[in-house]
Image (tube, helix red, strand yellow):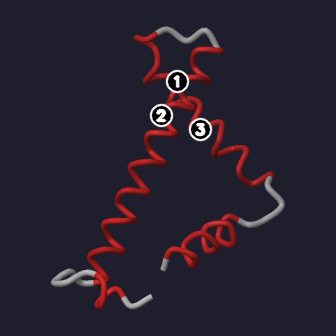
Amino acid sequence: MDLLQNCAGVLPSDVIQANRAAKMRELDAQLVGLFITRAAISDVTGPSFDDFMEGHLKALLRLEPEHPTPITDRIAKPASSTA
């Protein structure tokens, strides 16, 4: 698609960057929602949510190497589809 024909005065790179930023915000909101749900079913209280997040992030980082596909391959796939 030729964005130059469809967006007068807007560079295609600006549109791509704006779309990426919007997607990152959307994903971040989903992640926060998932962490809140995970905390709730773990009986975490509001004041201890930050500590829960830190501890759970460490647990997720320990789990990551168990995935059969290397992290570099898994990161490269979505990055190449958004380029």
User: Residue at point 39% right, 91% down?
Assistant: 2
C-beta proximity under 8 Å, tags 1 and 2: yes
Q: Name the residue rendered at 64%, 14% in the picture.
A: 42
Residue 52 or residue 11, whichever sits in front: 11
Instruction: Compare marks 3 and 2 and give the one earlier in the sequence.
Output: 2
- Of residues 34 and 12, which is closer to you in this image? 12
* Number of residue marks: 3
Which residue in the rendered view is the most extreme toward the right? 68
Estimate the spatial distance between the alpha carbons at disc 1 and disc 2, rounded to whole Å.
6 Å
In the rendered structure, which amino acid carries the disc numbered 2?
Val
Image: 26 above or below 9: above
Q: Quadrant of residue 21?
A: bottom left
Q: Which residue is mark 3?
A: 58
The x, y position of residue 70, in whole percent, is 74, 66
Answer with left or right where residue 24 lies relative to residue 31: left
Q: Residue furthest front?
A: 6
Does dot 2 land on a helix, a strand or a loop? helix
Q: Which percent across, then down, holds residue 11?
A: 24, 84
For label 2, count other residues whose C-alpha is less than 10 Å away and answer few (under 14), some (14-19) or many (20+): few
Q: Which residue is mark 1?
A: 36
Query: Spatial distance from mark 3 to mark 2, Cα to Cα?
Result: 16 Å
Q: From the viewer's perspective, is the residue at label 3 or at label 1 nearer?
A: 1
In the image, residue 13 sits, relative to residue 33, either above or below, namely: below
Q: Pick the quarter of the image with the N terminus.
A: bottom left
* Residue tagged 2: 32
| Three-letter code, disc 3 | Lys
How packed mark 3 is, by other alpha carbons closer than 10 Å (few <14, some 14-19, many 20 or more), is few
Q: Which mark is first along the chain, 1 or 3?
A: 1
